[in-house]
Image (cartoon, rainbow, N blue to C red):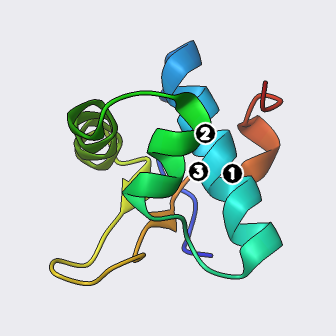
Amino acid sequence: MAAVSRAAKAFTPTQGQYLAFIHLYTRLHRRPPAETDMQEYFRVSPPSVHQMVLTLERAGFIRRQPRVARSIEMLVDPKSLPELL
């Protein structure tokens, strides 16, 4: 896991749920989730998931590699994440 950044910056409850999902999915499957995995879990449209991923990346909560599938890297301390609902 990368060095923790944005520790002081708070995330919204929805962002927290996405971050918690990414963290738990990565621990369980030993690879980050695809956007379709998040779409199925949260029961939202593909554009909604993509917008959330972009928002999390812009806020500095995650990092991705361009044109690489399943490249989400958490930049948030897992201890600060909410319980996944």
Dot 3: element: loop
Q: Are marks 3 and 1 in contact (CB under 8 Å)?
A: yes
Q: Which residue is mark 1?
A: 77
Q: Is residue 44 above or below residue 40?
A: above
85 up-or-down from 56: above or below: above
Which of marks 2 and 3 precedes in the sequence? 2
Q: Position of residue 15 (x, y in %)?
A: 49, 28
Judging depth in this view, the residue of 5 and 76 nearest the camera is 76
Q: Residues within 10 Å of mark 3 (few under 14, many from 20)?
A: many
Query: Dots 2 and 1: beta carbons under 8 Å?
Result: no
The disc, 2 or 1, on the residue closer to the chain's N-terminal end is 2
Dot in front, 2 or 1? 2
Residue under the point 61% across and 80% down: 31
Tell me the mark number nearer the camera, choosing from 3 and 2.
Answer: 2
Q: What amino acid type should be assigned to the residue bearing mark 2? A: Tyr
Give the residue pinned by disc 3.
76
Say which element carries label 2.
helix
Residue found at x 51% / y 28%: 43
Around disc 2, counting alpha carbons within 10 Å, would you say few (fewer than 14), some (14 to 19), or many (20 or more)?
few
Q: Which residue is mark 2?
A: 41
Residue type for callout 3: Val
Q: Residue at x 42, y 54 (%)?
A: 36
Q: Are marks 3 and 2 in contact (CB under 8 Å)?
A: no
